[in-house]
Image (cartoon, rainbow, N blue to C red):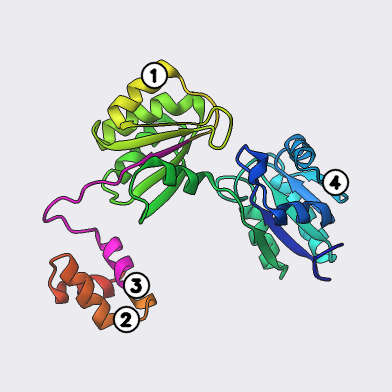
Amino acid sequence: MGEMSESGRLVLLGAPLGNPADASTRLREVLATVDVVAAEDTRRLTRLAKDLDVRIEGRIVSYFEGNEERRTPELVDVLRAGHHVALVTDGGMPSVSDPGYRLVTAALAAGVPVTAAPGPSAVTTALALSGLPSDRFCFEGFLPRAPAARRARLRSLATEERTLVLFEATHRIVGALADLAAEFGSDRPAALCRELTKTYEEVVRRPLGELARWAAEATPRGEITLVVAGAVPTAGQRPDDGTLRAEVAGREAAGLSRRDAITEVAAEHGLRRRELYTIVHSPQ
């Protein structure tokens, strides 16, 4: 059908976060030409296709958290038979805190080509709008649901120096912000991004303590992405051994010899070269 090759292929579709006008031309073409569209919410897909004036000729099947374990092998069989399958979630890229990872790994294991029609991402959109440093960041997805587990996870992230991006459900946002303020400090800059690209889009930029108080009063609704500034490095504090090993490995991957990579990282953190050499070569 259409632009696809003769062999089966899985296409991950980056769907609009809320505004249909953000849909790419390629997303429209793929929806109109593939044999099967696997959708997290078939009703949302139908509504999106109508908004885009796209006629989906292929078969539409549901693919969400509750059935992905069962449906994945079915879709892999369809792909191995030479058919083309598109995967679309409610918004953003599949497999980024959405269904998709299981199907991607299964398709690759079966020797099926996997590609993507990139599109909007709540992670990078919120990061850009937050006003916080975006040159280095990490994405943690959804925090644990249980309060004790959530606090433990945040405690482990409190010294992370990169900007942090999180998703959170509306009914847990007040508790999550209170825990963030407690573990990261009430003065840590943050931004709550709500309903991105939609009619009631809102970005609230405040220190965590103020943001937690605001959320408790405002009870924000809709799709929420949190962006939190990284920790300010403490003078004289060196990264843990795992981080040091990762920094050396990163420089090696960029083309430096291990000797030069160790020399650079040691100098950057005020370490003796022999000390870092021992860390890099010690059993993990």
In the rendering, which numbered label is found on residue 256?
2
Pick out the residue farthest to the top: 217
Reply yes or no: does residue 229 show up in magenta.
Answer: yes
State left or right for residue 211 relative to residue 275.
right
Distance in Å between CA atoms under marks 1 and 3 = 43 Å
The residue singled out by tag 4 in the image is 55
Distance in Å between CA atoms under marks 3 and 4 = 48 Å
Categorize mark 3 by other alpha carbons within 10 Å: few (<14), some (14-19), many (20+): some
Categorize mark 4 by other alpha carbons within 10 Å: few (<14), some (14-19), many (20+): some
Q: Nearer the viewer, residue 118 or 208?
A: 118
| Residue drawn where x is 76% and y is 43% of the image | 52
Q: Which residues are magenta?
A: 225-249
| Residue drawn where x is 30% and y is 31% of the image | 208
Distance in Å between CA atoms under marks 3 and 2 = 9 Å
| Residue drawn where x is 34% and y is 72% of the image | 249
Q: SS class of the residue under badge 2?
A: loop
The residue singled out by tag 1 in the image is 216
Q: Position of residue 169 (x, y in %)?
A: 51, 30
First in sequence: mark 3 vs mark 2: 3
Q: Amino acid at mark 2?
A: Leu
Quadrant occupied by the C terminus: bottom left
In the rendering, which numbered label is found on residue 7?
none
First in sequence: mark 2 vs mark 1: 1
Categorize mark 2 by other alpha carbons within 10 Å: few (<14), some (14-19), many (20+): some
Q: SS class of the residue under badge 3?
A: helix
The residue singled out by tag 3 in the image is 249
Q: For residue 74, what is the image quadrant?
A: bottom right
State left or right for residue 213 relative to residue 238.
right
First in sequence: mark 4 vs mark 1: 4
Distance in Å between CA atoms under marks 2 and 4 = 52 Å
